[in-house]
Amino acid sequence: MNDEDQQERVDIAAPAPPSGSPDAAQGGQPHDGHHPPTGTLSADRLAMKALEARLLGGERKLRRREVAAGAGLSLLSARKLWRALGFPNFGDEDVAFTERDQAALSTVVDLVRSGKLTEEAAISVTRSIGQMTDRMVVWQIEALVEDMVHEQGVTDAVARKRLVNELPALVDALEEVLVYSWRRQLNAGVQRLAVRAEAGLQASEEGREGDEDDAPLPLARAVGFADLVSYTSLSRRMNEKTLARLVQRFENKCAEIISVGGGRLVKTVGDEVLYIAETPAAGAEISLALAQAFTEDEILPEARVAMVWGRILSRLGDIYGPTVNLAARLTTLADPGTVLVDSMTASALEHDERFVLAPQPPENVRGFGEIRPVRLSRGLGKGLVLD
């Protein structure tokens, strides 16, 4: 750890140094380190400045030391929060912040100083906001650009320039839906904890009792992977638009099935999706629905699917542990259009008439030794019903 990293371990709850100290806000006239004095601005530049002022809550007038001091915080502590949000580094003379930046910083600091959050929790929560919103806005911008290219018949470069003029009419609506969705998702997350306490732990006792390897991990979950067959060879033969549509169709179909099944899509990586569910039965229903959907799809190739019930560690919006690794290994063993589970997961499902379980020949799996895969098929009932 270098000296600067060591200095970063500054308590956010500590007040800022006195105004006369070297770490306090500097006086003098603001100087924008990024934008030299300008004469007549082009229409595009004016539109960009107007959009920026609207999004940032005003014109950039503050340096980083001024914002930190205004929030009653040392610069080093402020930088910890800005880094968590994913902001770039700014110099002492860069006029990069607005009063809204100062208010946001004060909000986080107040949560720590009031005892509602520890400093560690505040940094982690802040980082979650920064990383998720960064991915979200990239997704939204690309979706809007793609739509303009398709509907307006313009090039990608022209669409990106036009976006600056299109966004002002969308900002308020997008912000409203974002806050609405966050509240719904937060409620759903709390509800999942209740489901885990009732059904999840009960199923854990039935399906993983005495499994000492998984015991230290806190959450009992069904972990599933779905992997498109021959995606690499297909992608090499596709142009940019065709590949984009295939990926979007894959993600949309996965997200719909997983949400209808009461699960959560953890992440997608190219041709693969990782998901979790609260119980073995829910994970099995989702897995069968995914395999069937891709088998019947006229555009997408078939998928290999695997699901394992076990304990996991959930951190940073992702999941970790042997259960995740085993599910990934089983996916590579599955035949196209089929679902594999391990023997422990099969034991948790064996009395459920909705599922048929067919033991497969033993396989030597890297990191796990010999395991006995079990093929999962539809039994009684219709399975997941998609509107």
Image (tube, rainbow, N blue to C red):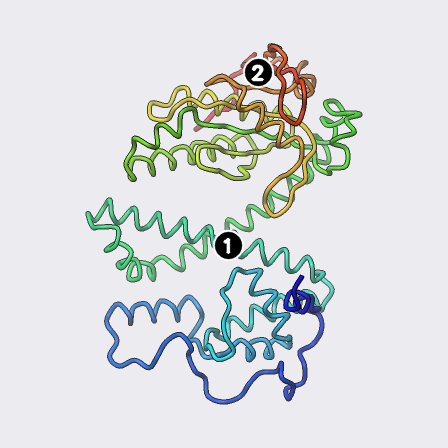
Question: Where in the figure is residue 224, as x and y percent of width and height?
Answer: 57, 29
What is the C-alpha distance between the residues marked 2 and 1?
39 Å
**Residue that numbered label 2 is attached to:** 376
Which numbered disc, 2 or 1, marks the residue closer to the eye? 2
The quadrant of the rendering that contains the C terminus is top left
Please give left or right for residue 137 compared with residue 329 in the image: left
> Considering depth in this image, is 376 or 289 the residue closer to the camera?
376
Residue at left offset 29%, top offset 39%: 241
The amino acid type found where label 1 is placed reads Val
Q: Is residue 371 above or below residue 59?
A: above
Q: Is residue 273 above or below residue 137?
A: above
Question: Where in the figure is residue 242, as x and y percent of width and height?
Answer: 29, 35
| Secondary structure beneath label 1 | helix
Please give left or right for residue 365 compared with residue 201 in the image: left
Residue at left offset 70%, top offset 30%: 199
**Residues tagged 2 and 1 counted as in contact (Cβ below 8 A):** no
Marked residue nearer the N-terminal end (2 or 1)? 1
Name the quadrant containing residue 84. bottom right
The amino acid type found where label 2 is placed reads Leu
**Residue that numbered label 1 is attached to:** 179
Question: Where in the figure is residue 374, as x and y percent of width and height?
Answer: 61, 15
| Secondary structure beneath label 2 | strand
Name the quadrant containing residue 120. bottom right
